[in-house]
Amino acid sequence: MMYPYRVPRSWSETSGQSPLSCLSFQNVTKTYEGAVRALDEVTLDLEPGLLTVLLGASGSGKTTLLKTAIGLVEPDSGTVRIGSLAMAGRTKSAARRRLAMIHQDFGLVTRLSVARNVMAGVCTETSLWRLLLQAYPKDVQLRAAEALFSVGLTASQFNRKARDLSGGQMQRVGIARALMRYPQILLADEPIASLDPAASDNVMQILRRLCDERGIGVVCSLHQISFARRYADRIVAMRHGQVIFDGPPSAFSGERLEHVFGQEATATSTPRLAHPVPAAGKYMT
Ligand SMILES: Nc1ncnc2c1ncn2[C@@H]1O[C@H](COP(=O)(O)OP(=O)(O)OP(=O)(O)O)[C@@H](O)[C@H]1O
Ligand SMILES: [Mg+2]
């Protein structure tokens, strides 16, 4: 099923201040060793059932923001909350159970079968001996099958080794594994960066559907403006660790694009960046 460009739903009505907000950042600041300020007083409220795209040049803080959301990076100051639960202290593990994350490199164990990769998504609720023996209970097997069907894989693919799949199929397995946790929020760090345009569309359509049909809040970092415009309810653009734009895709003009990506959006030479990124032209697709 295709998801054409959608008019944002509740974002414009609520201006991001909804009491239903499921993921909130309040004045979150993070400075890494070496004095790199990756996040600078970030305050955001992200709602359930909406697809938020994080845009920004390399090093702008997108991954750090996603990592603070799931508790992999501790902010120096400020708070992250999932609903009423703080992502810190005694409520941290309960808060984490409400989230799942997928990555650019899919994070699969490629020598294992598709089904076993997906069943591994329940590691927090399955005993160690079962995990070691990979003896998953029947209900976990059924959940894995349901998750795989929901991302468009067929039963004949369940027992294939993950390494034999295409990139797009691998990312769909990654999403299925994340769904095993019944997340309220799905964080996706550049989920389509390694995929061709057709597979990228397919993965973005699945993320869109998770928002629309299951009410999951998806927060997805991307480099491709075209995909952001096509699939996002809301764009949050970052620069030097700060949020410099927060609004619907229709308000994200070419002028703002240049502000977000600076010279990268127009440069003909490779920009000097913190770590390797795609060529500057990629931002213009
Ligand atoms: N573990 C770390 N130690 C030190 N500095 C780090 C670390 N992780 C990230 N940084 C720095 O923090 C800043 C933000 O990095 P981050 O990875 O969050 O950016 P990003 O927007 O995800 O970039 P990209 O688009 O390249 O993935 C960068 O300057 C980066 O070099
Ligand atoms: Mg990143």
Image: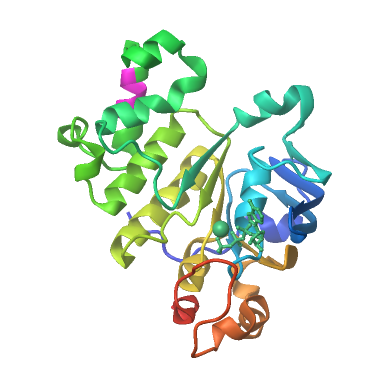
Query: Looking at the picture, how far across and down is residue 245, in whole percent?
Result: 71, 69
The N terminus sits in image quarter: bottom left
State which quadrant residue 40 falls in.
bottom right
Using the image as rendered, state which of residue 175 and residue 229 is in the foreground: 175
Q: How many marks?
A: 0
Locate ligand 2 by image quadrant.
bottom right
Q: From the viewer's perspective, tell me whether residue 230 is left or right of residue 137.
A: right
Using the image as rendered, state which of residue 180 and residue 113 is in the foreground: 113
Residue sitting at x 40%, y 42%: 107
Query: Looking at the picture, how far across and down is residue 277, in whole percent?
Result: 49, 69
Q: Is residue 142 magenta?
A: yes
Residue sitting at x 63%, y 39%: 70
Q: Is residue 72 visible?
A: yes
- Colour scheme in use: rainbow
The C terminus sits in image quarter: bottom left
Picture layout, residue 163 above or below residue 129: below
Report the magenta residues as a range.
141-145
Q: Is residue 136 visible?
A: no
Query: Looking at the picture, how far across and down is residue 111, in whole percent?
Result: 25, 34
Residue sitting at x 46%, y 14%: 126
Q: From the viewer's perspective, tell me whether residue 246 is left or right of residue 216.
A: right
The kind of secondary structure the magenta stretch mainly shows is: helix
Picture layout, residue 235 above or below residue 260: above
Picture layout, residue 146 above or below residue 272: above
Q: From the viewer's perspective, tell me whether residue 95 is left or right of residue 86.
A: left
Q: Is residue 153 magenta?
A: no
* Farthest-out residue, left: 156
Query: Looking at the picture, how far across and down is residue 61, in whole percent?
Result: 66, 60
Residue sitting at x 63%, y 30%: 96
Using the image as rendered, state which of residue 62 and residue 1 is in the foreground: 62
State which quadrant residue 274 falls in.
bottom right
